[in-house]
Image: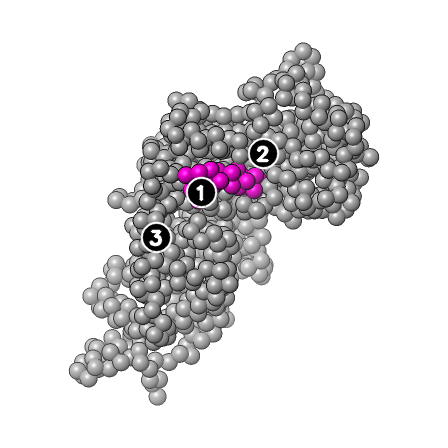
Amino acid sequence: MTVSAPVVSDIASGSRRLWALRERSLGWLEELLPTLAAILISLLLFGVFVALAGQSPLAVYAEMYRGAFGTWFSIQNSLLRAAPLMLTGLCTALPARLGMIIIGGEGALVVGGLAAGAVTIPLHGAPPAVVIPAMMLASMLAGGLWIGAAGALKILRGVNETISSLLLAYIGIALFNHLVEGPLRDPASLNKPSTPDIGEANMLGNLPGMDVHWGLAFGVVMCLVCHLLMEHSVFGFAARMVGGNPRAARLSGLGVPRLVILTCCIAGAAAGLAGMVEVAAIHGKANASLLAGYGYAGILVAFLANHSALGILPVAVLLGGISASGGLLQRTFGLPDAAVNVLQGILFVVLLGSQTYRGRVKLRRSPR
Amino acid sequence: MMTHLHPVALTTSPCPSLPSAPVRRRTTLGRLVQGTLLAVAVLSGCKQTEKAPETTTTAAAATPAAAKPSDSLTVGFVYVGSRADYGYNQAHAEGAKAVAAMPGVKVREEENVPETVAVQKTMESMINLDGAKLIFPTSFGYFDPHILTLAAKYPDVTFLHCGGMYTEGKHPKNVGSYFGYIDEAEYVAGTAAGLTTKTNKLGFIAAKPIPQVLRNINAYTLGARSVNPAVTVSVIFTGDWSLPVKEAEAANSLVDSGVDVLTSHVDSPKVIVETAEGRKIFSTGYHASQAALAPKGYLTGAEWNWEKIYTAYVTKVKTGQPWDHLVRGGLKEGYVKLSPYGEAVSPDARKKADEAKAGLEAGTLVIFKGPLKDNAGKEILAAGVSRGQTDIELEKMDYLVEGVKGSLK
């Protein structure tokens, strides 16, 4: 293929190292090519939709670029929107490596946010150095328990984790609403029931030099840590083996139940942390604004990233950018808000379709 | 498009910061970017050469257009839902339309903006990219923390919020808040409903048992019972502002229980009014007019009249006059209004409803006055006590009045 052309000259030098490099980059490219093609096809299809809506696709793309990455403000806007998606993306991506489809990240996020808000009530007056770690811990614990429960139900009772995690999300949201509107309600929050304010001192604030809160750092660090865990550790190797063939994994003496439940707990902890970020970086209290669908968007992120913790980072930024540009499309072109959803929907379907080509695109000569 | 999105997506990928073998990684990544660009070039063919210059010119042309000419004012409107929802957001969008018709005013609108950091970014985007100097963030939940955060950051931009949350001395000077006493319109709609019902059973589908909603339910009930003491109002809380499926279920179950007039306090009463019409019963509307959805059964409705508040505010901000930080009013001020009576409202009912309206406008009729009992028989207001619209106690309402079938527990 044409793509390998610039690399061919490298091989001519005869260096073994370059050969390995070529193999490696081509391997990467083989992995990425279906994804890239899918994004391109989605954009073409979206262009047709835009043209049908009476707008010039090129002008719309240009405006989308301006709204998503065209200015420093736009880039920060995209990164800010990407931050929760990184964490909720992990909630689906990690268990997927063990062959489980978890779609209840919204529940973990909500109970995580609730726990973060609730834990500040008994800690009233404590220094931020105590309160902030307590919020993080509480949210991760709550989120971890929530998705861990789906894992445990799977292991102990054979309950389908997709359904149980979704149902647990409904339970989480109901519990959240009950507590926020009832026992944990700040009496001063009349028309918007909320937990008591966590206090200005306990807010996370922005990253230095940026208009983006610390949630972005949490997201990036969690993705990197989970990448190392899943790809470069014995735990990750064992987990992926379970995903490949649970029976073989069990036969080779791996503690499958432990791996499944632990991975689910880590996944839920990530989504729970996203809830804490919403509370501690944005709202300052837990209320219905937490139910913004980040948990469900995380499913999309994980699938687009092919369940790679590292892949989540660019995908989250891409989706953050799409959502950041959505407002500008509405305001400049009068396109309905749904236009951005149409793009995301096309992207999702085409990408899932493109996954069937993964491994069938060959750039390297297959070893014989 | 691809050439723009991709390098960005890739360069933000954290690969280079990975601890292991940084040099080799970076080379691989560089190769990868190169390969990607090439692959894109191959796949998109010659189209790409056309795209690139187009992109730059459009972006460059858009920037100066966003700059604000000194004699014009760019006003941003932010909605939490669809601006064609036959409800809360449409009511605001109708106000925005009136503003857009004013000379020297440019309106930029954005809908379906959740009450998250997204609304902060929408407002900032309106300020930075559209040059907006006045913003109407119309959802109640936008106020704290979103408007407060941005108002501190952009002191030369005016933020006017719907909800009446402004507190002097506590909130920034460039923030205002307005609200309407829509319970007055609910009271009048209640009288029309009370005189139209044949079963004496009215149904009220509400989102959440918060003071603002309870005040509407109670006013509607008091209005209906003022002309027909046999009336009861059955309440169903759905739990959230926009749950069309639950709203339809609630509507059907109320009709099944004998209710023959339905009303609601949810973001969009569309489904409820349509269900009522489909089941051949009556309905009264909320937020905006739903008359078009139910030509036979729509009696009247409690509507906002944001046009009045918005055009007044915009004129003041544009001409540099001082404006009020807190604006509230009801029928008298024209901030709320009633949908024109439907064909099902009898002349007698119209007369009674008009009388109630005139009384509220003149201030001779007070909705919440003693003796008033809640629906468990507990006395709320003793005889002789009356709470006018500005009474702060009404903002803490936590009861359902006698005649309401339902519970807050």
Q: Amino acid at mark 3?
A: Ala
CA–CA distance between discs 2 and 1? 20 Å
Q: Earlier in the sequence, mark 1 or mark 3?
A: 3
Residues drawn in magenta: B88-108
User: What quarter of the picture does the C terminus of chain B occupy?
Assistant: top right
Magenta stretch holds residue B92: yes
* Secondary structure mostly seen in the magenta stretch: helix
CA–CA distance between discs 1 and 3? 16 Å
Residue A355: x, y in percent?
A: 45, 71
> Along the line of sight, which residue is nearer the eye, A218 or B209?
B209
Q: Residue at x 47, y 63 (%)?
A: A51
Image mark for residue B107: 1
Residue B93: x, y in percent?
A: 53, 41
Q: Nearer the viewer, mark 3 or mark 2?
A: 3
- A317 relative to A292 in the view: left or right: left
Image mark for residue B304: 2
Q: Amino acid at mark 1?
A: Val
> Along the line of sight, which residue is nearer the eye, B333 or A237?
B333
